């Protein structure tokens, strides 16, 4: 297989060989197609959450890099920062699932799982989110969750 060779600062033959081997594995094992399929499945499942939880304002992403924005009101798009923080903390404590928040107001869940993430893993993640969102309750005393 032919790759165009370019030299730039810090590159060396061993690092290039390693990079080419990784690219071969990604292609041979169909990991890009897998990421697209599982990522689309994740977005579909999160959109299902949006149908039952008004807290979900938007779902966006590409492949396995997916964001879920939480808002208090879908019209005004007021960020649901405390709710997001509470959900993030409870995901770890109750389900042992590490999630992260992003955005200037920390109200966007960012899902960036490893390439081996499966549809079964998506089902586990979304079921945990649904359970927590269904029992969220008062979050007025919530503190910021470092992620």
Image (spheres, rainbow, N blue to C red):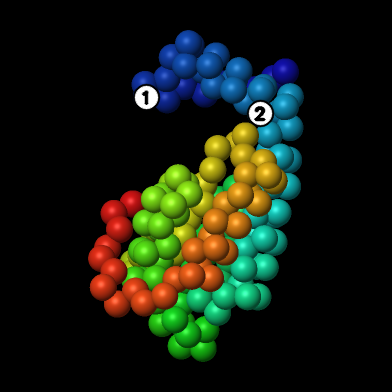
Secondary structure type for disc 2: helix
Q: Which residue is mark 1?
A: 9
Q: Which residue is mark 2?
A: 26
Instruction: Give the image location of residue 133, x and y in percent.
Output: 51, 68
Instruction: Give the image location of residue 79, x and y in percent.
Output: 40, 76
Q: Residue at x 67, y 22 (%)?
A: 24
User: Toward which corner of the image does residue 29 lie, by quadrant?
Assistant: top right
Q: Residue at x 62, y 63 (%)?
A: 46
- Left or right, 146 with respect to 24, comes to left
User: Toward which corner of the image does residue 84 lie, by quadrant?
Assistant: bottom left
What is the count of numbered marks?
2
| Residue 79 vertical position relative to residue 85 in the rendered view, above or below | below
Q: CA distance from mark 2 to mark 1?
A: 25 Å
Quick one: which residue is furthest to the bottom in this view? 75
Q: Residue at x 29, y 69 (%)?
A: 142
Of the two numbered discs 2 and 1 on the same chain, state the one appearing first in sequence. Answer: 1
Residue 103 seen in this snapshot? no
Instruction: Give the image location of residue 62, x and y in percent.
Output: 61, 54
Alpha-carbon neighbours of circle 1 within 10 Å: few (<14), some, or many (≥20)? few
Q: Nearer the viewer, residue 37 or 51?
A: 51
Q: Nearer the viewer, residue 19 or 67?
A: 67
| Residue 139 vertical position relative to residue 130 in the rendered view, above or below | below
Q: Nearer the viewer, residue 22 or 140?
A: 140
User: Toward which corner of the image does residue 11 lie, by quadrant?
Assistant: top left
């Amino acid at each position: 297989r032919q790759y165009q060779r370019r030299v730039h600062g810090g590159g060396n033959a061993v690092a290039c060989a390693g990079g080419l081997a990784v690219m071969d594995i990604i292609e041979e094992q169909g990991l890009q197609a897998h990421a697209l399929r599982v990522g689309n499945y994740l977005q579909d499942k999160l959109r299902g959450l949006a149908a039952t939880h008004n807290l979900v304002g938007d779902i966006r992403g590409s492949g396995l890099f997916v964001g879920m924005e939480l808002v208090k009101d879908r019209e005004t798009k007021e960020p649901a920062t405390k709710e997001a923080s509470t959900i993030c903390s409870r995901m770890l404590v109750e389900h042992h699932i590490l999630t992260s928040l992003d955005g200037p107001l920390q109200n966007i869940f960012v899902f960036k799982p490893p390439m081996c993430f499966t549809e079964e893993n998506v089902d586990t993640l979304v079921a945990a989110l649904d359970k927590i969102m269904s029992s969220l309750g008062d979050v007025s005393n919530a503190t910021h969750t470092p992620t």
